Each structure stands twice: as C-alpha cells, then as structure tokens.
C-alpha cells in the first residue's frame, strides 16, 4: 500500500515492506500549503514507489518539511510549492545544511513527478548540483585478523562458560527442594527459581520469612539467578557471536523473533529477517550459527517461560542484572556492548578497547568467509543477498592487503589462462630437431630450449601420454619443481606441449575416450569437465598428415585399458 497524505490533521501515513504501519503528523506547521505539497512529494519517495522504507528515514524528511516551511514563512512566503522561485530556494538551501537540502530537493522532485506544478527555474535548480555536499562516508574495512580472533574467542569463552553453568544449575535444581523446608542451600534456591522465575532479594526474603540483609548475605541469590537465567552480559556474547558466525546485518539480528526461525531438517535453519535498507530477506544459516542458535534457544527457554507476551517471542532477551527480576527483550544497546568489550578485555591492535561497529562485523564476516571454506585461500565469493555492484562496493573494495594480492593473483591467472588457450597447438610435421628449430624459433626462444632439450623433445625422452613436455617441473599445473600431476587431457591446452607424429595413436585414443564420456554423462557435466579438451583434440588432429592418422587408427582399440585412467574415470 503506498504512502498517503491526510489533510486534517496534516500528516502522512506509511506502510513499510516489513508490514509495519506508521503515521507522522505536522500540527501547527508554519506554512500548511507548502508542507502539504512537500508531503505529496515524500509520498512518491516512500516504498513501494521509492527507496524510503523505514520510519526513521521518514522522520528525517518530516523534520525537513517543518524546517523549510518555518524558514520560508519567516521570510514572508506563505504560498505552496508552485509559488517558489529560484532565488528564494537558493537562499534557503545555502543556509539549510546538507541533510535538509537533500531531503527538500528530493521531495520537490517527487512533488513534480506526482503531477505537481513547479516553476521551471525551481525544477532546474532542484535537479542540479547541491550547495551543501553530503559528507564522504568511508567504507568500513574489515577488522584486522588478530582483533577479529580476540573478539571471537572472548564471545565463545563467555558463551561456553555461561552455558555450562546453566546446565549444571538445571541439574542442581533437579536435586533440590523447597528452601522454606530444606534450607537455603544453592540447589534448593535453584529449585525455587526454576519454578518461580527471576526474583529480587526482597521477594526471596518475603517468601522465606527472613530479613532482607540475611537473604542478601547468606542465600547466594545472585549466583543462582546468573546460572539459571541469561543476564544481559551473556545475551551480548550470544548476539556478537551470532553476528560473527552468520554475517547478518545488525538491524536484521536485533528484531528477530522465534517465529523467524524455520527448521528445514534436523540441522538446517532458514532464517527470515528484515534488512532495514531494503526489505525482507532470508538466509540458510552456516552450521556454526545453527548450533549456536540451538544452544541459545535451550539456554533461554527457562527464562522465556516467565516472560509475558509479546516480549516472550523476541529472540534476544536477558535479565537486566543478577539478582533482579526485570527482563530486557529486543535490541541490545550499543553502550551495553561497549561495556561488555571493556570487561572482557577485547582490544584492538593498539591495545585500546575495540571500537565495535556491527556493520563492520558483517564486512569482516564476508571477507573471512572463504578462509574456512577454502582452507586459507581467502578468495572472495559473491554473497547471494547482494547484487554484484553492492558486493564490489562494500566488500571487494574494503579488503586487507593480503586479500587484494589474492584478487590480483586471480585476475593474473585468468588472463594467463586465456592467453595460453588462445595459442595454436604445436604439431611437428616430422620428428627432426632441425625442423623444430626452423619452424618454431619463437617457441625455442620463449621456453629457453637449448640443443639438448630439443633433442629430448623430438627423441621421446620428454614424452608424457599425450605429447612431449618442454618442462615437467615448471609448476603450471602443480607445485613448482615437482613432476606435473595433470591428467592426460590437460596437456591438450598446455603451452608446454609439443605434438609429434608418434603421439597420434594416443590422441586418437583420447578422442575415443571423450566420445564414450559424452554418451554416459549429461551434456552440461561433460562440457564442464571435458568440453575444452574435446574441442582442442580435434584442432590438434586436423594438423596431422592424413596418412599418419590412417596408420595410427589401426593401433587403437576403443577401450579404457589404452589410457592411464583412475577408477572414477572409467567409462564401463
């Protein structure tokens, strides 16, 4: 449903993509006619017509409406947007500041797009360059690996310690009894709190008919409550660790409810969340995030049973302080997070308490994700939740030096691979060293082949299955200095391969092998594995003399035993 402007009282009503509805009223505005026209322009900017899709963003625009109406009314302007003139608008924008200028520009253009009448000079000014340029916002780089490791370890340590204490406390509650008859032993207090929920020391004193001072000094209420019910310190650790493991944006994590969790099997969770800048999204959680979420649901289940609706459905909740009964449900304030980092000694590379920006956690998660998948390869992949442009702007451009080197290496490897594949195959008309040196002087020069190597190439000492190799230790397909581990067909596209007449039988055997694979594999799978090589073998064989091929055809039997294959490569 689009945003609508209401007349009495003047305001705008919006329905956002997450289903939330909000209303913004402008009572006692200085110039109602201008304010109404600007609100009509704002309606064109709000979802689904525009990109404004959050109540906080609309409030910024409403404040800009009030400011513009008040300022122009102070200069005697009481007409609508159609009465604005270029000089008036330029004077206002030069003194308005970047935020109000940007909002009012967009609303005036939205008003014109909705069919409103604007002076030609005003419209030209609104479409032009801003007087107050928006401040440059630097992309958040990933956290250094050392700081990222310290944050992760601190959160994991806090979560594991609290969860073990919680399990032990539940076991103790099973052994306890009512402290009114059994005394104030810890297990008895655990038994009581597991049945009544969090309570203050005053509640406990009244129940046991003892003084508050006695209850405070002798019962261990703070210790027991901290074990059974996750206090805010533990909740912060879970939230941070879940951000590290999942990489979901902070505004998506903060407002999660238990209804957003969709189990897709025993070990897979599809999590639905709202990304404030766009709309509803979903993500299949990584395995570590699934295990952590399972643990949190178990850890918080006892407390959740004592929390009234609708707070009970919030995913993140915790007791405000040990020994108190008030429960916080929903987003964790950033000041609480900063105090948590200081208490747990999470510092940056300069030894100061880490300055946490949870959007930066997401950036670091994306940058680090491939290290675990590719065992240290650090190559980036595209996040399915982003367009390639957003991925490039926010992650590929915000990389560590090591990751930039890795990206450069990928580009160089791809360029070299394209260059190698574009080279025509080297096929000798005869097996004479003189012919090789005469017909392929550039090959001899580029590979730095001396007379001894040339003799070995044409004499068969450097033969592999498919061709003669100019340098098996070059490291093109394996570790440099080690024998090449490539499969026989890989030689077809290798720039070090030299094909002589004696290789024709094996090339024909390889062509027959491709034919058998084509018959048993799906087309797409065959093209992905053997496609480039099956095309190349035809190009190589076309350069052979027909008489050589006719003689070689008599030597092949069209079965797998003729090739050095692994068991999984057999075609029968």
Image: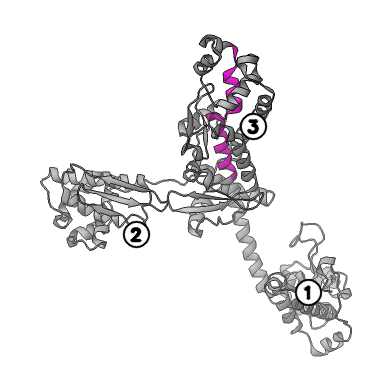
How crowded pointer 3 is (Cα within 10 Å; few <14, some 14-19, many 20+) is rated as many
What is the magenta range?
Answer: 218-245
Q: Give SS at disc 1.
A: strand
Q: Give SS at disc 3.
A: helix
Of marks 3 and 2, which one's residue comes earlier in the chain?
2
How crowded pointer 2 is (Cα within 10 Å; few <14, some 14-19, many 20+) is rated as few
Q: Position of residue 179 (x, y in %)?
A: 62, 17
Pointer 3: what residue?
A: 163
Q: Quadrant of residue 565?
A: bottom right
Find out whether the residues at labels 3 and 2 contact each other: C-beta distance under 8 Å. Answer: no
Q: Quadrant of residue 519?
A: bottom right
Question: How would you classify the magenta stretch by its main secondary structure?
Answer: helix
Distance (Cα) linking label 2 and label 1: 63 Å
Pointer 1: what residue?
A: 498
Of marks 3 and 1, which one's residue comes earlier in the chain?
3
Give the number of the mark in front: 3 or 1.
3
Instruction: Report whether 148 appears left or right of 63.
Output: right
How crowded pointer 1 is (Cα within 10 Å; few <14, some 14-19, many 20+) is rated as many
Vertical comparison of 553 with 299: above or below: below
Q: Is residue 236 magenta?
A: yes
Which quadrant: the C terminus? bottom right
Which quadrant: the N terminus? bottom left
Distance (Cα) linking label 3 and label 2: 47 Å
């Amino acid at each position: 449903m689009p945003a609508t402007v209401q007349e009495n009282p003047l305001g705008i009503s919006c329905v956002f993509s997450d289903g939330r509805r909000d209303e913004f009223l402008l009572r006692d505005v200085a110039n109602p006619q201008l304010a109404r026209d600007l609100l009509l322009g704002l309606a064109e900017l709000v979802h689904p017509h525009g990109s404004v899709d959050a109540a906080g963003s609309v409030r910024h625009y409403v404040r800009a409406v009030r400011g513009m109406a008040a300022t122009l009314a102070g200069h005697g302007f009481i007409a609508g947007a159609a009465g604005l003139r270029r000089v008036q608008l330029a004077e206002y924008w030069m003194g308005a500041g970047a935020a109000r200028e940007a909002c009012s520009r967009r609303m005036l253009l939205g008003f014109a797009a909705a069919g409103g009448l604007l002076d030609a000079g005003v419209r030209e000014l609104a479409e032009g360059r801003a007087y107050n340029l928006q401040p440059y916002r630097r992309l958040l780089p990933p956290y250094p690996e050392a700081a990222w490791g310290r944050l992760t370890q601190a959160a994991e340590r806090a979560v594991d310690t609290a969860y073990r204490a919680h399990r032990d406390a539940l076991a103790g509650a099973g052994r306890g009894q009512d402290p009114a008859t059994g005394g104030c032993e810890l297990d008895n207090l655990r038994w009581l709190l597991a049945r009544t929920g969090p309570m203050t020391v005053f509640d406990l004193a009244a129940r046991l008919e003892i003084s508050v001072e006695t209850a405070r000094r002798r019962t261990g209420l703070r210790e027991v409550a901290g074990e059974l019910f996750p206090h805010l310190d533990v909740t912060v650790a879970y939230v941070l660790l879940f951000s590290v493991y999942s990489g979901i944006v902070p505004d998506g994590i903060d407002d999660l409810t238990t209804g957003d969790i969709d189990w897709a099997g025993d070990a897979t969770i599809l999590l639905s969340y709202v990304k404030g800048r766009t709309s509803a999204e979903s993500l299949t959680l990584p395995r570590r995030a699934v295990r952590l979420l399972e643990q949190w649901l178990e850890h918080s289940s006892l407390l959740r049973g004592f929390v009234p609706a609708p707070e009970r459905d919030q995913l993140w909740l915790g007791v405000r302080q040990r020994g108190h009964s008030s429960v916080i449900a929903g987003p964790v304030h950033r000041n609480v997070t900063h105090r948590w980092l200081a208490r747990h000694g999470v510092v940056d590379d300069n030894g100061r308490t880490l300055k946490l920006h949870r959007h930066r956690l997401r950036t670091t998660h994306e940058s680090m994700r491939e290290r675990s998948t590719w065992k240290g390869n650090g190559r980036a992949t595209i996040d399915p939740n982003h367009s390639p442009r957003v991925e490039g702007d926010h992650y590929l451009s915000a990389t560590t030096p090591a990751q930039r080197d890795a990206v450069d290496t990928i580009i160089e490897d791809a360029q070299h691979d394209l260059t190698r594949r574009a080279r025509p195959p080297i096929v000798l008309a005869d097996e004479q060293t003189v012919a090789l040196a005469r017909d392929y002087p550039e090959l001899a020069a580029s590979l730095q082949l001396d007379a001894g190597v040339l003799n070995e190439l044409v004499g068969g000492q450097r033969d592999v299955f498919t061709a003669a190799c100019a340098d098996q230790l070059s490291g093109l397909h394996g570790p440099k200095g080690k024998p090449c581990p490539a499969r026989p067909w890989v030689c077809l596209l290798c720039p070090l391969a030299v094909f002589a007449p004696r290789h024709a039988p094996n090339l024909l055997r390889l062509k027959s092998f491709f034919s058998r694979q084509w018959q048993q594999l799906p087309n797409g799978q065959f093209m992905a594995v053997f496609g480039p090589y099956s095309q190349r073998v035809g190009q190589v064989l076309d350069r052979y003399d027909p008489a050589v091929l006719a003689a070689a055809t008599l030597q092949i039997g069209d079965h797998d035993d003729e090739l050095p294959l692994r068991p999984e490569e057999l075609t029968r």
